Image (spheres, rainbow, N blue to C red):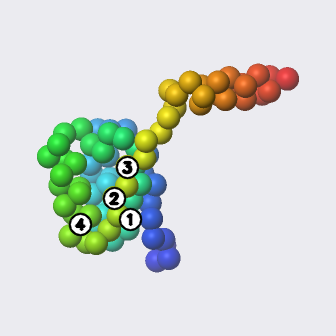
Amino acid sequence: TSNCEVVVCLVNRRHSVDVDKDVLKSKKHILTEKPMDQTYNQAKELADLAEKNKLMYSVGFMRGYDTVVRNAKNIIKQYRYL
């Protein structure tokens, strides 16, 4: 929609460069998970495109394998089966 300012992009890494590029070309800020892309050149291309369009390209550092997060997931699973 026209009032959308940012897109959270969570896709398989092999598709991310194309999807991320489309988002940036549509003049939307973007948040992805790390790694930014499969190669340095792909990541640089996306960073350059974001800079050219004065957009924020942000890479989140999800902590899915962090001990605290894993413990929280286990607690949630226990309650799910009660």
- Amino acid found under the numbered disc labelled 3: Val
Between 62 and 23, the one nearer to me in the picture: 62
| For marks 1 and 3 on the same chain, the one whose residue lies earlier in the sequence | 1
**Is the Cβ of the residue at disc 1 closer than 8 Å to that at disc 2?**
yes
Q: CA distance from mark 1 to mark 3?
A: 11 Å
How packed mark 4 is, by other alpha carbons closer than 10 Å (few <14, some 14-19, many 20 or more), is few
**Is the Cβ of the residue at disc 1 closer than 8 Å to that at disc 3?**
no
Name the residue carrying label 4: 51
How packed mark 1 is, by other alpha carbons closer than 10 Å (few <14, some 14-19, many 20 or more), is many
Residue in the picture at 77% in, 27% down:
80
* In this rendering, position of residue 64 left or right of residue 21: right
- Amino acid found under the numbered disc labelled 1: His
The C terminus appears in which quarter of the rendering?
Answer: top right
Q: CA distance from mark 1 to mark 2?
A: 6 Å
Residue 19's place in the image compared with 62, above or below, is below
Name the residue carrying label 1: 29
Instruction: Give the mark toward the camera: 1 or 3.
Output: 3
Q: CA distance from mark 2 to mark 3?
A: 7 Å
- Amino acid found under the numbered disc labelled 2: Tyr
Q: Position of residue 28 (x, y in %)?
A: 38, 68
**Is the Cβ of the residue at disc 2 closer than 8 Å to that at disc 3?**
yes
Q: Position of residue 33 (x, y in %)?
A: 40, 44
Residue 54's place in the image compared with 7, above or below, is below
Residue 56 occupies quadrant: bottom left
| For marks 3 and 4 on the same chain, the one whose residue lies earlier in the sequence | 4
Name the residue carrying label 2: 57
Name the residue carrying label 3: 59
Residue in the picture at 17% in, 55% down:
45
